[in-house]
Amino acid sequence: MADYNNTTFGNFTGNSTNNTDEVTTLEPRAPSIAEAILAALIVLIICSTLVNNFFVLFVFGKVPRLRTPGPMYFLVLLAITQFFGVIFSLVPSLVSVIMGGEWIMGNVFDDVSAYMANLCYHLTVHTLGIICFERYLRICRPLKHEEIFSETVTVIILFGIIFFDCVLAIFHS
């Protein structure tokens, strides 16, 4: 027979009885080894993502010959997307892991975090697809590449991807 008088909920332990008038006290417990390892891995991912994407933006800012419309715009969008993904998805996840699995940031931020995670996912995938197509044209069909990927068309493609993924993330979050 199950013992319902001593029940564990996430990071808190409470003693419950069948009397509904009694208030249950919650006592915090120490994080487990798995939670500590997960928190350390999330911190490592956050730090490496921030440093690597900062270097990408720094290099594009310092080296003028990398500032061609196609690759630079797409890779800068990818780096910015990664920054937003870390800030709005991984940092709240880290806070949740540190708090023992409890979400303390409220429902609105939960919805914003889910939306931004979906937006960053879709932006990353679609930007990588456009980068692959752009590189294919650059290597295999250089004349077609110059015709398609002018600066104006590249900016239109970027804003089109951003708009499409903003709408798409609404329906997936």
Image (cartoon, helix red, strand yellow):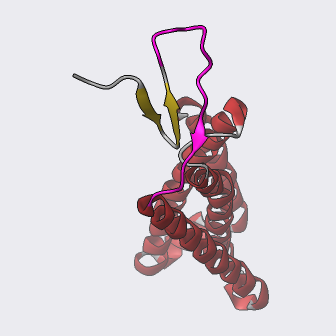
On the image, the x and y values in percent for residue 39 come to 53, 63
**In this view, 130 is above or below 53:** above
Q: How many marks?
A: 0
Residue 106 locus on image (x, y percent): 70, 34
**Relative to residue 34, is residue 158 drawn left or right?**
right
Residue 164 at least partly seen: no
Quadrant in the picture for the C terminus: top right
Residue placed most toward the observer, 65 or 144: 65
Which picture quadrant has residue 58?
bottom right
Q: Position of residue 67 (x, y in %)?
A: 72, 81
Between 172 and 90, which is closer to the camera in this rendering?
A: 90
Q: Residue 107 lies in what quarter of the image?
A: top right
Position of 16 relative to 44 (above/below): above
What stretch of residues is rendered in magenta? 17-32
Q: Position of residue 68 (x, y in %)?
A: 68, 79
Residue plotted at (45% across, 10% down): 18
Work out whether 125 lies above or below 54: above
Residue depicted at 32% across the width and 25% down the height = 3
Q: Is residue 75 magenta?
A: no
Q: Nearer the viewer, residue 55 or 94?
A: 94
Question: Is there any visible trace of residue 10 in the rendered image?
Answer: yes
Principal secondary structure, stretch drawn in magenta: loop
Q: Kindly identify the residue that appears in the image at 65 percent across and 49 percent down.
A: 162
Q: Nearer the viewer, residue 116 or 98?
A: 98
Q: Residue at x 58, y 64 (%)?
A: 148
Q: Is residue 30 magenta?
A: yes
Picture quarter with the N terminus: top left
Which residue is situated farthest in the left direction here? 1
158 in relation to 138, above or below? above
